[in-house]
Every structure is written in structure tokens, then in C-alpha cells.
Image (cartoon, grey):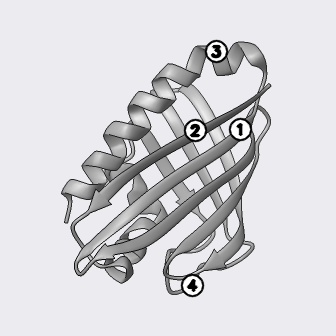
Amino acid sequence: MIEEFRISVVVPASVEVVWRELVSWERQGEWMAMTRVTASDLGADDSNVGTTIEAFTGIGKFGIVDQMRVTKWQPPTFCEVEHFGKFIKGIGEFKLSEISEGKTRFDWYEKIFAPKFLLILIKPAILSAVYLSLRKFARTF
């Protein structure tokens, strides 16, 4: 089954500042709900196509591991990842656009291929958690 998710928030900072914080992979757990992130590269200065990212979302030992690989890297405005884990496959995108001086629109997009039962179970939680997480991210500036 395929599901698409889109969420946007306005961040009160420049595109460059938002980008550096957004792609500080291991710091994403500070604002992404119930998630711990590890990556093969640290962030904006050393990431590129091929960087691998692993995100565990859950409580304790119960949750889902999302394995990703950067497939497009266009700093400071666009990053695409391929989800290639056991249960979650698809693409994800971060897109940043300046909407006025000191304000950036952050568009988050996911196109996920996963078993129907899993998507039915997690879709409401994904939308709620990501929306709240992106708002939390925007408030950190």
C-alpha cells in the first residue's frame, strides 16, 4: 500500500539557519517525537548523497526502525531520502523556501510503501506526531 504525507510549517529563521539545524541528523531526536537518530555523517558540512540515517521511533524496545539513504542533496533548500528498511520503503523530502526575510517555509513530504495493516495502524500517529514535531522544531528558533 502507498500513502503520501505532506506537512508544512513556517520557521522564524533564514533558510540557511533552518537547513543547518534540520540536517543535524542526530539532533533530530530533540524535536522529532519519540525518535532516536544515528547517521553516517554529522550534518550540513559532511552529509551528501549516500549519507545513511537510521531513526528508531517508539517507546523502549517497541517501535519501528526507519533506514534511509540521502539520494538528492541540494543545500540549503532540498534533501531527498530513500527509505529502504524492512517494513518502510519509499521517499522522503525536506524542502525549504524563503517566504520573507527571516522566515522559511519547511515542507515535509513522505511517500511510503508499507504493509496495509502497518499503514492503517500508524498513519494517524504519523500525521499527529510529525505535525507536532515540526511545530516544536519551528519554536526552537
Give the structural element (helix, strand or loop) at label 3: helix
Q: Position of residue 119 (x, y in %)?
A: 66, 21
Q: Position of residue 14 (x, y in %)?
A: 29, 79
Give the structural element (helix, strand or loop) at label 4: loop
| Labels 1 and 2 touching (C-beta < 8 A) | yes
Res 32 label: none
Q: Position of residue 76 (x, y in %)?
A: 49, 81
Mark sitting earlier along the chain (2/3): 2
Mark sitting earlier along the chain (3/1): 1
Q: Residue at left 51%, top 52%?
A: 108
Q: Distance between the residues labelled 1 and 2?
A: 8 Å
Asked if residue 125 can be seen in this view, the reply is: yes
State how many labels appear.
4
Q: How far apart are marks 3 and 1 (CA)?
A: 12 Å
Closer to the camera, 52 or 13? 13
In the image, is residue 55 above or below residue 46?
above
Closer to the camera, 60 or 25? 25
- Mark 2 closeness class: few <14, some 14–19, many ≥20 residues within 10 Å: some
Locate residue 128 relative to residue 139 in the image: left or right.
right
